[in-house]
Amino acid sequence: MTKDEIKRFNTTTLAYLGDAVFEVIVREKIVRERPGDVNRSHHTAVRYVSAAGQALAARNMVAENFLTDEELAIYKRARNHRSMSRPQHADPKEYKIATGFEALLGYLYLSDDRERLREIASEAVRIVDALTTGRGYARSRPKPSA
């Protein structure tokens, strides 16, 4: 499947896949770092995979120009897509931003760009950690070349 074919996917489909991919990446990180109490692990994961956590990460990545132009276009297309579903446990604006983030991850996964997928997921985790634990936020990597 080519990138152009993947770009034609419905953004909701990309977000559906991206949500699952990010959840697995976050769970793997947590299990590797602190194996044991699954209940505690779940509560830790929610900080990252919730709409609020994803929106926090996405906003900061956009503000810091962490995404390439192509990635930003996919994120914005999904974020701006008019959805008929309403978020149950999230602010509607955060939900739209999180949907854009998830769609980008879904796109990278289907494009088989696992290196960049991991970079973005790792950056999201770093941002959420820094901004929810009071350690401050410093971007860890420069924007990749397109």
Image (cartoon, rainbow, N blue to C red):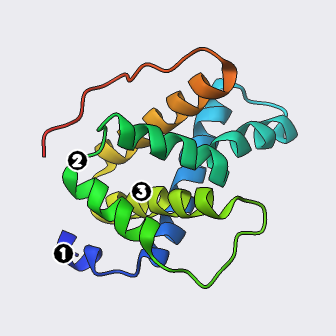
Q: Is residue 61 left or right of residue 47?
A: left
Q: Residue at x 56, y 42 (%)?
A: 56
Q: CA distance from mark 1 to mark 2?
A: 16 Å
In contact (CB < 8 Å): disc 1 and disc 2 = no
Res. 4 mark: 1
Q: Which of disc 3 and disc 1 is earlier in sequence?
A: 1
Residue 105 is marked as 3
Residue type beneath disc 1? Asp
- Residue 104, image quadrant: bottom left
Q: Earlier in the sequence, mark 1 or mark 2?
A: 1
User: SS for tag 3?
Assistant: helix
Tell me the number on the disc at residue 68: 2
Residue furthest to the bottom:
84
Q: Residues within 10 Å of mark 1 (few under 14, many from 20)?
A: few
Residue 74: image location, x then y, percent: 32, 64
Q: Nearer the viewer, mark 1 or mark 2?
A: 2
Percent position (x, y) of residue 55? 55, 49
Mark in the foreground, 2 or 3:
2
Q: Name the secondary structure under disc 2.
A: loop
- Residue found 55% across the figure and 80% down from its top: 83
Of pointers 2 and 3, the one earlier in the residue sequence: 2
Task: Determine the CA span between mark 1 and mark 3.
Answer: 16 Å
Give the image quarter of residue 40: top right
Q: Which mark is residue 103?
A: none
Q: Is residue 118 visible?
A: yes
The kind of residue on which mark 3 rests is Leu
Q: How many marks?
A: 3
Q: Quadrant of the N terminus?
A: bottom left
Q: Residues within 10 Å of mark 2 (few under 14, many from 20)?
A: few
Residue furthest top in the image: 135
